Image (cartoon, grey):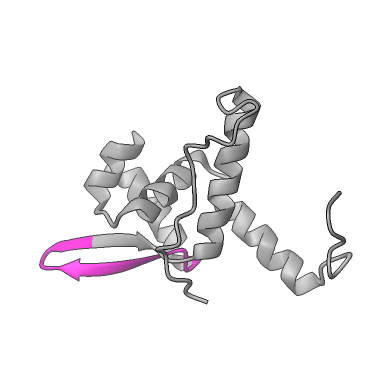
Amino acid sequence: MHDEPIRPVPDDEHAQIAADRFRMLSDPTRVKILWALFQAESNVNTLAENVGATPAAVSQHLAKLRLASLVRTRRDGTFVYYSATDAHVHRLLAESLSHAEHVTGVAAGTDAHSYRAAGRVADSR
């Protein structure tokens, strides 16, 4: 039922990039942080409160996400605000979280998903 892929097997470079993105998304706290940042920019303390982690832990995750170019910063006085940058990752997260709804039975047999990738995030690539 699925269309055949254009490339039956990805080349080494593309496979590595995809694996690196999955590696960055392999931590539940980073998934929560990124999802929150796709909804609105935020500072470390607000993110920590929203995702149920300490500010120190969130800060460490944000540093990794920033190095991977998945978040960017904006300084306003003494505050630093973070936002998510990659529309592809937003769609990937939305699809993964929608799948999780099916696995847990929350969205069994329906198309009513709580997680959707809105078109508002500008792709940084």
What secondary structure do most residues of the magenta stretch adopt? strand
Residue lying at 87% horizontally and 65% vertically, measured from the top left: 9
- Judged left or right of residue 17, residue 55 is left
Q: x and y percent of residue 108 in the render? A: 63, 25
Task: Count the marks.
Answer: 0
State the extent of the magenta-drawn residues as a range.
Answer: 68-80
Whether residue 32 appears in magenta in the rendering, the answer is no
Q: Nearer the viewer, residue 76 or 115?
A: 115
Q: x and y percent of residue 26 in the render? A: 58, 46
The answer to whether residue 6 is above or below residue 118 is: below
Q: x and y percent of residue 95 in the render? A: 59, 47
Q: x and y percent of residue 18 in the render? A: 68, 62
- Judged left or right of residue 99, residue 47 is left
Residue 54 seen anywhere in this rendered image of the structure:
no
Residue 68 seen anywhere in this rendered image of the structure:
yes
- Judged left or right of residue 72, residue 67 is right
| Image quadrant in which you'd find residue 88 | bottom right
| Image quadrant in which you'd find residue 78 | bottom left
